[in-house]
Amino acid sequence: MSVSVPSRTRLVARIGVAQLIGYGGTYYLPAILAAPIGRELGLSSNWTFGGLSLALVVSSFIGPAVGRYVDRGGGRRALVASNFAFALGLTLLGLANGLAMTIAAWLFIGLGCGLGYYETAFAALTRLYGVSARRLISGVTLIAGFTSTVSWPLMAWLEAHAGWRGTCFFWVAANLLIALPLNLTLPAPGVVVEPEAASGERSRQPVVLDASSERRAMTAIALMFTATAIVSSGLSAIMPNLLAHFGVSHTTAILASALIGPAQVIGRLAEMGWLTRYHPLVSARLATMFLPIGTGAFVLGGAAFAVPFTMLYGLGNGILTIARGSLPLAIFGPAGYGRRVGLLSAPSRMAAAAAPVAVGMLFDASPTTGLFAMVACNLIGFAALFIISTRARH
């Protein structure tokens, strides 16, 4: 039954902005606030980055349960609960007077991550729009792709004028006064929206896999998600230093690294545009090859290829973010989508939590070896996608 709900465009815009606020006040927070938090509390800034890792571990444990809850119609409630969890965690962080309170803050933030990051939003939209949710998922990631562009300068300004505690309380207010009302605009639980399928989407129904093929596909997708999460989380933390090691000037390294964000947006626009004509497997395979191609050009061509290298890395990242939602939908269909995405995201979140430290240590030992290890991870992801079988269950 059709019901009166926000238009697709408005719904995507609202959920996208809510995601921007959710990620901006948590995932992107340590980059700006780790140093001032450490100075005032007498802690190494690594404790703040470790707090984010702790939050991602917490989210990985609760992800499958949250996914099953969304499948039962709890998408809006999960997203709303995430805003309260973020607000509580950020309040504790803003009031923190030592390590114990800081850890407690990140535990609550981790609860919010598990309840309200991309996977929950994707599952909620899939429950409403079924197989035609791919374009909505792309739209949400397109808006949220500007998170670093918006949140880092904003937090730097806020920290300079209101301190790091005031910045934390700003994100508390943003969650409760902006993101919470936006998440409440999702249709009520139990409402099923008749999808307005884009051209070609309705006819591209998922193949019903036999049990063996489904297990193989789940394993392959989880492997791809995990391998590429190591690359995304690890390289993002060290990119300017990596470029400098290969002879790129400081100014060029900063410029090339800054272009990763716009490149991700370009990749997401491509996924929303001409790539919708192809199965998400095609998009994902293409995306995993951008880093190896860019690395080859960079290693052979030297510093002159720094910008193409980071742009190709960003393009791949942008498309792969969408693949985290669209690929399971295309392979398995909307039934049980939340549970599957929760299971698939658990190992990748664990990997993302450990990657900055592990990859940093690897690059400290040998930057060249570290770079080729990242290429190997992407190639593993590329190969894993060819394991997936599309044999139907008879």
Image: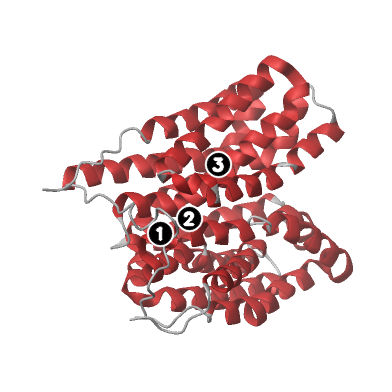
Q: Position of residue 202 (x, y in %)?
A: 35, 58
Q: Furthest residue to the front?
A: 199
Residue at 78 percent of width and 22 percent of height: 304
Question: To which residue does mark 3 refer?
Answer: 355
Q: How many marks?
A: 3
Nearest to the observer: residue 5 or residue 202: 202
Along the horizontal axis of the image, is 271 left or right of 145? Answer: left
Report the residue marked by disc 2: 57
Label 3 and label 1: CA atoms lie apart by 17 Å
Badge 2 crowding class, 10 Å Cα cut-off, few under 14, some 14 to 19, many 20 or more, is many
Pointer 3 or 1: first along the chain? 1
User: Which residue in the rendered view is the most extreme toward the left?
Assistant: 394
**Residue 353 visible here:** no
Classify the position of the N terminus by image quarter: bottom left
Q: Secondary structure at mark 3?
A: helix
Tell me if 93 is positioned left or right of 165 in this view.
Answer: left
Looking at the rendered structure, the kind of residue marked 2 is Val
- Give the labeled residue for mark 1: 61
Instruction: Tell me which amino acid carries mark 3.
Output: Ala
Label 1 packing within 10 angstroms: few (<14), some (14-19), many (20+): many
Q: Are marks 2 and 1 in contact (CB under 8 Å)?
A: yes
Q: Measured along the vertical axis of the image, is residue 276 above or below residue 284? A: below
Q: Is residue 147 above or below residue 83?
A: above
Q: Residue at x 70, y 47 (%)?
A: 262
State the SS at label 2: helix
